[in-house]
Image (tube, helix red, strand yellow):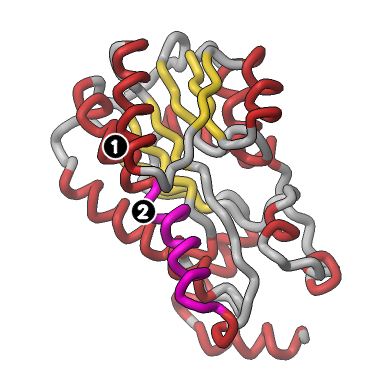
Amino acid sequence: MLSSLADRVVVVTGATSGIGRAAALRFAAAGAKVVGTGRDQRRLADLAPHVDCALTLDVTDPEGVAMFAAAVVDRYGGVDVLVNNAGIGLFRGWETTDDDALRRVMDVNLFGPVALARALLPSLIARKGVLLQVASVAGKRGYAKHTAYCASKHALIGWSESLRHDLRGTGCDVVVVCPPAVRTPFFENAGYMTFDEDHPNLVPMTADAVADGIVAAAVERPRSVILSPRARALYALSVVAPGLLETIQRFKK
């Protein structure tokens, strides 16, 4: 158990914007040695002064993932926390979600995090660390025009929950963090330009609030956490009365 994050080595992927950047800054403020990753060189340069190290990483590049993991372990001696946050969305109907689009979402949201986790698991196990998988409430429920995204997050949660069983007794924990809608460029980048118009009464979480939940999860190590009372209530309703929830959603439209 990490009673303190001071001097702990924390890797955060997708740390150049949104949730990832906010989480990297929160861990750094808690005294951790943060390695933030991303693909945007300008944003990495902006992040670098605030963390211990900012490195280029494309989680879909197997050779790059292996080289990154080896470099981090060589530099720091190991990793205590891996926050697998890098991800993309896709707002598109099933009929226009072709194989290439589906594979791209799965590569970034599933195969990339899995590859990095596998590369760093020996170190995480040796240091009794924690793997934090940033999934989504979309990994718990289905949403219209999110077939690829929901599939990727459902798969990430399934892999992570199975991994937790495999790691039983090692001292290394796996935590699944499920944010709801967050006020970041995520929906615009996913092609969902009318999100706010379609959800006039919804107040998205801030990236800072999600980051606080991620840092707390690194210390407390729950099995999983849904970072919103509203999202938790809707998920519970989807489990006990899915038909009722769908009726309510249709009525609201």
Characterize the magenta stretch by its predominant secondary structure. Answer: helix
Residue at 52% from the left image edge and 16% from the top image edge:
53
Res 216 seen here: no
Q: Residues within 10 Å of mark 1 (few under 14, many from 20)?
A: many
Left/right of residue 185 with respect to residue 124 in the rendered view: right
Residue at 29% from the left image edge and 56% from the top image edge:
159
Q: Quadrant of the C terminus?
A: bottom right
Quarter-of-image position of residue 92: bottom right
Q: At numbered mark 1, what does the secondary structure look like: helix, strand or loop?
A: strand
Q: Which residue corresponds to mark 2?
A: 111
Work out whether 227 lies above or below 90. above
Q: Which label's residue is closer to the chain start, 1 or 2?
A: 2
Q: Position of residue 134 (x, y in %)?
A: 48, 47
Say what amino acid the circle numbered 1 marks.
Asp
Q: At numbered mark 2, what does the secondary structure look like: helix, strand or loop?
A: helix
Q: Which mark is residue 151?
A: none
Say what amino acid the circle numbered 2 marks.
Phe
Q: Quadrant of the N terminus?
A: top left
Q: Which mark is residue 173?
A: 1
In front of the other: 220 or 125: 125
Q: Position of residue 146 (x, y in %)?
A: 57, 73
Q: Position of residue 149 (x, y in %)?
A: 52, 66
Residue at 44% from the left image edge and 69% from the top image edge:
151
